[in-house]
Image (cartoon, coloured by chain):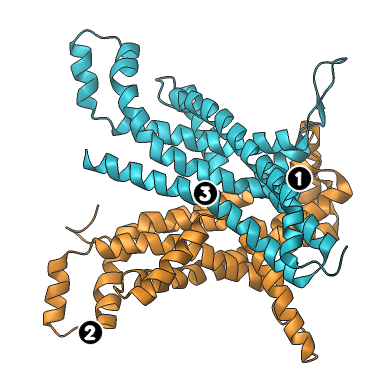
Chain colours: A orange, B cyan
């Protein structure tokens, strides 16, 4: 049944000059679906990872302590002003090589896979962008509210977690959603270090078949779907978290 | 290879090649942003016209090229476009770097269109009405009243876009353009020493930072000046 549908779809697209014959090959179809899965896994792993990095960096930036704020500021500036691909190479080709050499001295293998490196690099990269958005949000919290909380005996950490971050999250949500949309698109660089994401699997298929246009259209459709889902979720969250009388 | 050379001496030896690679990155980014800005202004202007067809077409353009990963667009222009262009007899080579320029110009145009539309819409509509009450035509209002204010508002986001495209040029190395990242990879594989590999990747990170950070600082300064007006 499903097979007949696939055959029908491929035959229907043929007159348009689009050759989707690869979906009839069980191996290549599985590879493409696996790639879609890996891209989705990357997104699902990196979104919370980057948010955690963002919160930590924002806390350091607004801590008012120079020994925390200055390194955080330097990290954010370097991360925002250098290409993700170069950061990925610095991590995967340089750090990973050094770590592998260390492990080899103890006669062990390196446990860090390319997938883990993409997770680390994109989380740190997007975390720096989240941090800037959250910092602006934290600084927009009315001072009177902080004084009120302090007078109730809130400590620094408590103040950040219970007062500043919830308000900053609402303030920064539009930029955070934008960043997450960017993050989804950014996972495509994983293909540069042979993580089997949807882009990488497609390259593998089109080097065999010469059907670049067909695969690129599918990839674009897939990323379009993912970014659309993120934007929808963002709008839902904005409505859900809206506080009357605060923010836009 | 002379084994007695230090990693730093190797880096010095490779520095002309690395700087040439950086030149390719800068050239590609300048061309891509110039082309993309021209196209984006046209798309943005069309999106504000009263013709529904144009509105739908430009919306599709902007949505498609803003939501596509830049890397995928670069693959698109590199592998889908032919390696030669021109009518039957006159064949001109269509080099990969030019395809990368086009691949980067597409997202640039979509973003510029949005920046342009946003800037025009940020001008209070009362200005249109006031100018029209002075018997100015629509085109005249746009040219004399709206556009000069828009240009000032568009500059900071446009410069952010430029910095982002300049960083995206590093993706050109993935389709075989001899840019800075590609040169660093060749250097690292040729010298094949751990300390040199660390040094050369650190160097290209520093070069990109040295190029993009001043742009970011200048943009921030412009934004601050604009905010006080």
Q: Mark 1 lies on which chain?
A: B
Q: Which chain carries label 3?
A: B
| SS category of the residue bearing label 3 | helix
For label 2, the crowd category at 10 Å Cα-Cα, with few meaning under 14, some 14 to 19 and many 20 or more, is few
- Which residue is tagged 3? B212
The residue indicated by pointer 2 is A155
* In the image, farthest residue toward the front: B4
In the image shown, does A228 or A116 lie closer to the viewer? A116
Q: Are marks 2 and 3 on the same chain?
A: no
Residue behind mark 1: B178
Occupied quadrant, residue A233 = bottom left
Q: Can residue B69 be seen in this view?
A: no
Q: Can residue A46 be seen in this view?
A: yes
Chain under label 2? A
Image: A79 above or below A112: above
Structural distance between the alpha carbons of marks 2 and 3 = 39 Å
**Residue under the image location 25 percent in, 9 percent down:** B136
Single out the mark in the foreground, 2 or 3: 3
């Amino acid at each position: 049944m499903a097979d007949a549908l696939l055959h029908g779809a491929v035959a229907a697209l043929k007159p348009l000059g689009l050759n989707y014959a690869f979906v009839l090959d069980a191996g290549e179809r599985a590879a493409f679906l696996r790639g879609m899965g890996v891209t989705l896994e990357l997104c699902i792993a990196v979104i919370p990872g980057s948010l955690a990095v963002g919160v930590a960096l924002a806390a350091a930036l607004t801590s008012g302590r120079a020994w925390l704020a200055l390194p955080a500021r330097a990290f954010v500036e370097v991360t925002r002003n250098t290409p993700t691909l170069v950061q990925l190479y610095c991590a995967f080709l340089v750090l990973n090589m050094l770590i592998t050499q260390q492990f080899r001295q103890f006669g062990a293998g390196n446990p860090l896979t390319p997938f883990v490196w993409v997770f680390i690099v994109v989380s740190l990269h997007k975390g720096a962008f989240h941090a800037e958005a959250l910092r602006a949000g934290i600084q927009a919290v009315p001072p009177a509210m902080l004084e009120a909380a302090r007078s109730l005996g809130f400590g620094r950490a408590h103040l950040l977690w219970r007062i500043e971050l919830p308000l900053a999250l609402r303030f920064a949500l539009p930029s955070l959603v934008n960043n997450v949309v960017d993050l989804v698109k950014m996972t495509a660089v994983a293909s540069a270090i042979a993580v089997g994401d949807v882009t990488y699997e497609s390259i593998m298929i089109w080097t065999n078949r010469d059907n670049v246009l067909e695969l690129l259209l599918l990839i674009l459709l897939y990323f379009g779907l993912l970014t659309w889902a993120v934007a929808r979720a963002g709008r839902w969250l904005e409505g859900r978290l809206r506080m009357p009388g605060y923010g836009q | 290879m002379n084994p007695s050379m230090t990693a730093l001496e190797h880096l010095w030896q490779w520095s002309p090649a690395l700087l040439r690679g950086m030149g390719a990155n800068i050239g590609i980014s300048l061309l891509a942003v110039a082309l993309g800005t021209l196209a984006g202004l046209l798309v943005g202007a069309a999106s504000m016209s009263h013709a529904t067809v144009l509105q739908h077409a430009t919306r599709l353009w902007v949505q498609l090229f803003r939501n596509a990963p830049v890397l995928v667009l670069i693959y698109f222009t590199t592998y889908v476009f032919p390696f030669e262009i021109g009518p039957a007899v006159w064949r001109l080579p269509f080099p990969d770097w030019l395809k990368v320029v086009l691949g980067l110009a597409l997202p640039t145009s979509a973003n510029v269109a949005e920046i342009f539309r946003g800037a025009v819409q940020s001008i209070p509509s009362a200005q249109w009405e006031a100018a029209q009450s002075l018997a100015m035509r629509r085109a005249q209002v746009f040219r004399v009243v709206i556009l000069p204010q828009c240009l000032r508002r568009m500059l900071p986001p446009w410069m952010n876009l430029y910095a982002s495209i300049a960083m995206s040029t590093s993706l050109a190395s993935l389709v075989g353009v001899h840019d800075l990242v590609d040169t660093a990879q060749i250097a690292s594989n040729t010298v094949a020493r751990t300390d040199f590999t660390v040094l050369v990747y650190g160097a290209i990170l520093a070069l990109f930072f040295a190029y993009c950070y001043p742009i970011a600082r200048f943009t921030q300064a412009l934004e601050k000046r604009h905010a006080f007006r």
